[in-house]
Image (cartoon, grey):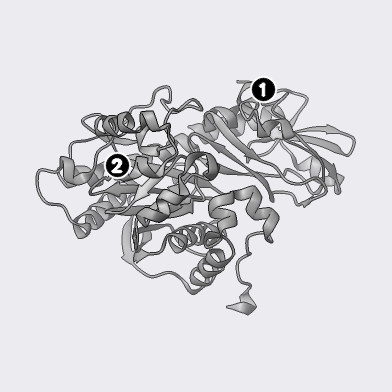
Amino acid sequence: MEFPDDLKYTKEHEWARIDGTRVVVGITDFAQEELGDVVFVELPDIGREVEAEGAFGVVESVKAVSDLFSPISGTIVDVNSVLEDQPELVNDSPYGDGWMIVIEASNSAELDGLLSAADYQTYIQQESS
Amino acid sequence: MQWRFLDTGSDNAGMNMAVDEAMLQTHDAGATPSTLRVYGWQVPTLSLGYAQKTDQEVRLEICRQCGVEVVRRPTGGRAVLHDDEVTYSVVMPIDLPDGSRTLTEHYRLIGLALSAALSRLGLPVILARPQRSVMSRQGASPACFAALSRYELSVAEKKLVGSAQKRAQNALLQHGSMPFTLDRDRLFQCLNVPPEQRAHLVQDAYVTMTAIHEVAATPIGKADLHEALRYGFSTTFGVEFVPDTLAPAEQVLAQQLYTAKYATSAWNLGGASVWRQSSRAAPALPSEEDR
């Protein structure tokens, strides 16, 4: 299972790749493994405002429907529309081609509250025990 | 610890789903305790999974002719025909008492509760062992019961209880159909399957699917199953049940969800994206001032 060091993480199993105020978001390797085969991803419209810990979309796998939670507040500036026809990218490449949205962050301080790879790894070890 | 036990009786399809979602939202907000609910369906209903494409998978005209309602669930999976059955739904925290939170663990525990319930009724039920999921994107049948997945319940290798789960931030909803009888012909008449395969699929369903009255050695009624479910969840989760009714906030929210979502063709036939484009976001909980 992968926990790239260059990413930040949340307890809801999203990852964030931070580039200034532009933040790319997806779900983690742990999340996609727990979900099983992803069959559907519902993403928001570009331009929509999101709040930290607010739901921005939905993922359905063969096991469950799960809300997707934004790590930060801001505006959706891009979505990975490829996932509409290829939801399996979330399983095959959760940190790469399976990315979900790009947020223009409105509150940089929220980025400091995200988990490091080491902290996230500790968290999921506790969660799974 | 106490959970609520709700018997909301038989209602129309849209309200059944609206109540389940209202229960999830209120429990997610911390406003209600964990709850086990049992209910039924006023008319036979085909419930679809969250992302199923109605135009591809359902024969709507046949459903109308057969008097079968169509509703879309808030949970995933494939089509289920509800009729002569008890439907269970449970809302509970994602954080389990032992600290674990995983999807797999929830399915396991709820599976154990259902297994304990059915075993109490003398049914030789088996909880499917964790293994590579049989369900995949390449599933041939749009019908849920034709696929056996992890921690699901079977008798003599035939699926008896199909369940589906929706996870919010702090809480989850899992619900499932526990049929007394199965109308396999009607199910596959309602589904859009290749005509030349329909008869084979129905025959196959006698091998892959079963119902309580097909496997029970003694008569089992709704009250028996209700009591067994209370027993199963009580012993598995270490809780006692208090009979209750929906809280006022849940009733209001369920009515709002019914009107805005589960009674609309945009949701039931169009799906989530169509519905969101045609309406506002799902209603928020009533504020304290509104209560």
Left or right: where A42 falls relative to B234: right
Q: Element type at marker 1? A: loop
Q: Element type at marker 2? A: helix
User: Of the residues shown, which amino acid type is indicated by label 1?
Assistant: Ser
Front residue (pair B138, B281): B138
Residue B79 numbered mark, or none: none
Q: Are marks 2 and 1 on the same chain?
A: no
* Residue B119 seen in render: yes
- Across and down, in percent, residue B144 comes to 40, 38
* Residue B148 seen in render: no
Q: Are marks 2 and 1 in contact (CB under 8 Å)?
A: no
Front residue (pair B116, B200): B200
Question: Which quarter of the figure has residue B122?
Answer: top left
User: Of the residues shown, which amino acid type is indicated by label 2?
Assistant: Asp
Question: Which residue corresponds to the image point at 48% horizontal and 64% vertical from the top-left?
Answer: B32
The number of discs equals: 2
* Residue occupied by mark 1: A93
Front residue (pair A12, B282): B282
Q: CA distance from mark 2 to mark 1?
A: 41 Å
Question: Which residue corresponds to the image point at 32% horizontal and 30% vertical from the top-left?
Answer: B128
- Across and down, in percent, residue A120 comes to 65, 32
* Residue occupied by mark 2: B185
